[in-house]
Amino acid sequence: MAFVQRVWTPANIFQSPADLYFNLAAPASSLVPTADANTLVLDANGQPSSATGFHAGLMEAPTMPTITEKANEIHADQSETPVDVGFGSIEAEIDCIVKELNLSRLQTFLGSANLGAYTVLGASQAWQIGGQLDSSASPMSVTAVSQRRDALGKFAYWMLYKAYLTAPVQMVFQRIKEHVFKLKFKGVMDLTRVPGDELMQIVRQK
């Protein structure tokens, strides 16, 4: 008889804040990824190498990447519980709380560049909303990068290849607490990528 051994690995317990990046160029797709070619290249500070994108600034905890699998329970009249299950769908999203009021970044969060216009004036910034006459949208990549607490200079990241904003950009001003933006970005399949690598990539450096 075989026995399953108990294994405790405290280093696998993750605790660290995350930095959020938007519009990074996604690495090339492969069902069997190789370092650098098919994953993000991070420097010693966890900053990604990319020709596009920006850092979202200071964040408030928690930043939450979420993967949700939905299944269809198959019932029969002869049984009081499901007798089988069928796969339905899988979804991924990243929820975050942005603290900095930066109008140019808020413009980028919108689902299309035509939904608003950001302008730098002589003594102010202006963000105008509205004006799109069609239903086109421009999903963006959303990436959360977090430092490993047990290995200096090593990181983990979660990247949605194509995502869109599903939460309102809400502004609440009050005396007793600073203002934050609670944002939710949901991923959609990138059908240009290899099947099995179309929604999200999670990498833990070692």
Image (cartoon, grey):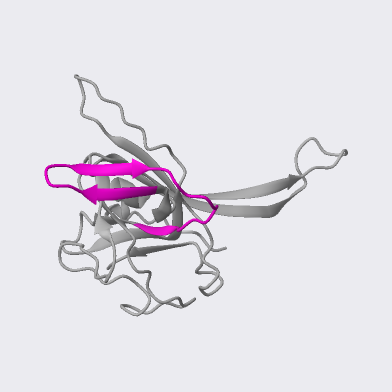
Front-most of 104 and 125? 125
In the shown orientation, is residue 204 left or right of residue 32? Answer: left
Residue 117 counted in the magenta span: yes
Q: Which residue occupies 66% across, 49% down?
A: 71
Q: Where the N terminus falls, by quadrant?
A: bottom right
In the shown orientation, is residue 137 left or right of residue 20? Answer: right
Residue 16 visible to the viewer:
no
Q: Where the C terminus falls, by quadrant?
A: bottom left
Q: Position of residue 30 (x, y in %)?
A: 46, 77
Quadrant housing residue 203: bottom left
Quadrant housing residue 96: top left
| Identity of the residue furthest to the right in this view | 78
| Image label count | 0
Front-most of 15 and 28? 28
Residue 124 visible to the viewer:
yes
Q: Position of residue 189 (x, y in %)?
A: 54, 62
Q: Position of residue 67 (x, y in %)?
A: 49, 51
In the shown orientation, is residue 123 left or right of residue 25? Answer: left
Give above or below for 36 relative to 132.
Answer: below
Magenta stretch? 116-142
| Identity of the residue furthest to the left in this view | 123
Quadrant housing residue 162: bottom left
Residue 185 counted in the magenta span: no
Q: Which residue occupies 88% across, 39% down?
A: 78
Q: Which residue occupies 48% across, 59% down?
A: 4
Q: Which residue occupies 36% across, 33% down?
A: 170
